[in-house]
Image (cartoon, rainbow, N blue to C red):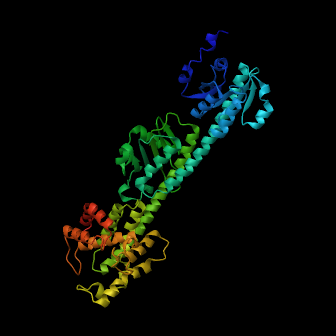
Amino acid sequence: MNDDFLFANDTGEEDETFSIGSWKVIIVDDEPEVHAVTKLALSDFIFQDRKLEFISAYSGAEGKKVITENPDAAIILLDVVMETDDAGLQVAQFIREEANNHKIRIILRTGQPGQAPERQVILNYDINDYKSKTELTAQKLFTVIMSSLRAYRDIVALDNSRKGLTKIIEASADIFSIHSMDQFIDGVMQQLTSVIGCGNEKAMYITDTLMVNCENLRNKDGLTVIAAQGEFESSLGKNVKDVVNEELQAAFQEAISTKSIVYRGDYLVAYCYSRFSNNSILYVSGLPKEVSQTERTLIELFAQNVQIAYENVQLQLELEDTQRELVYRLSEALENRSNETGNHVRRVALISGVLAQAYGLNQKEVELVSCAAPLHDVGKISIPDNILHKPGQLLDDEWSIMQSHSETGAKILEGSNRSVIQAGSIIAQDHHENWDGTGYPKGKSGEDIHVYGRIVAMADVYDALRHDRCYKKAWNKDETIEFIKSESGKKFDPKLVQGLLNSVDKIEQIIEQFQEG
């Protein structure tokens, strides 16, 4: 055989030609002729419409490097005797133990079987086949490559299914933890990207009017966009007929009629089944060019969980709204008894949220402080009217009774398992404590005063100063700010004072929006 012909395919061009959509086969052998003959014998090999991509290494050390650089290789044809008598065996051990690659099929080839007896090698090394070079004809080479690729394919499929199931479980857990409709579609897209590696260019979640509880999203005719991303972000609350073209509308209807997932080019429309609604649809664009059957199965599982997650968000929002309304109504009733309007508790709640955010609390705590703030004066229910409504200065014994409302409020709210009520108890207890220790009821100082109490104390004082009370006229913004600054390090936490100064425009907007009735 002509040497030029033998090495014609050993230029590296073949690797580049078949680098996409090919099966990687690593040849590790110190004889160049073995590389050339192997490539020639398998030059027309095709399995599942994919050719072979050959990667060559000429020593055990080079073989280890190539394995590390190509963890997705399907097969390694590995010579036993190279720079040392057991160089190939060392590579096999490296693959399984150090590279931790248990997918690649290892086929040992040796021209000196006596150097490494087959039974001993198979017992001691995690290999998949052992061949003498003299018995490895073109046909037998074809057979061993075919059987090895089938095994590799099945192992990869099983591993992908395992990883996919793990991702589905993680994705479902993440989505179920979302309590905001604003975060819902972002969460769906983030997790779907993780599951199948799609892009996140555009996405919509669409449902029928039976599932849309929010008045501003209610649509009397057909499907309504309730969450969106990308170019559809401005479509919230709109009928899909006013948002998408006829082709996409047809895909929606097909998904609904077949109760399945419809794939069109780079996007999908997934029907999301639920016993609580008639029709819900998830639309996602930016899919990879080819979506495997495994990925389609994962998408189907994911789509089923998306609807449950959406219903979970709806239920959570309804519970939070109900809880917030009850807190407001109770607090407003108490404020009305104090001859103050209910808008005071709303303003204190919103101002507390602004201050909590400026202070650096996380979003969960910001929402918690805002929700619990209206409960700060719940203890006033125990204060007699003649003291509560007295326009002048209180006498010492009257002032002592008035001060008792902090501990009374804390006792009313203590013992609950609900985080909002727990926070309300803390706030009721600490919102009259002063940074310098001159407050009541415990005379706490500095950071011994719970941060929730410090925040609501400042919000309460700021709003009270900005409005008329039975004992004073409203102060203007500048007078109020000067007082707050003068009490930094005395009545108020200096860090909170700075946060208020940085956020005063937001606070004044709240006061403007919720004026006294």
User: Quadrant of the image for the C terminus?
Assistant: bottom left
Residue 17 x, y percent position in the rendering: 53, 22
Residue 259 on image: x %, y %: 53, 45
| Above or below 350: residue 101 | above
Q: Position of residue 374 (x, y in %)?
A: 36, 72
Image quarter of residue 199: top left
Residue at the far front in the pictured view: 84
Q: Is residue 122 visible?
A: yes
- Judged from this view, the residue extending furthest toward the top is 2
Count of all numbered marks drawn on residues in the image: 0
Q: Which residue is more in the foreground, 185 or 390?
A: 390
Q: Nearer the viewer, residue 467 or 308?
A: 467
Q: Quadrant of the N terminus?
A: top right
| Quadrant position of residue 119 | top right
- The x and y percentages for residue 413 are 44, 77
In this rendering, does residue 207 appear at all? no
* Residue 479 in the figure: left or right of residue 162: left
Residue at 40%, 73% in the rendered image:
448
Q: Is residue 379 above or below residue 253?
A: below
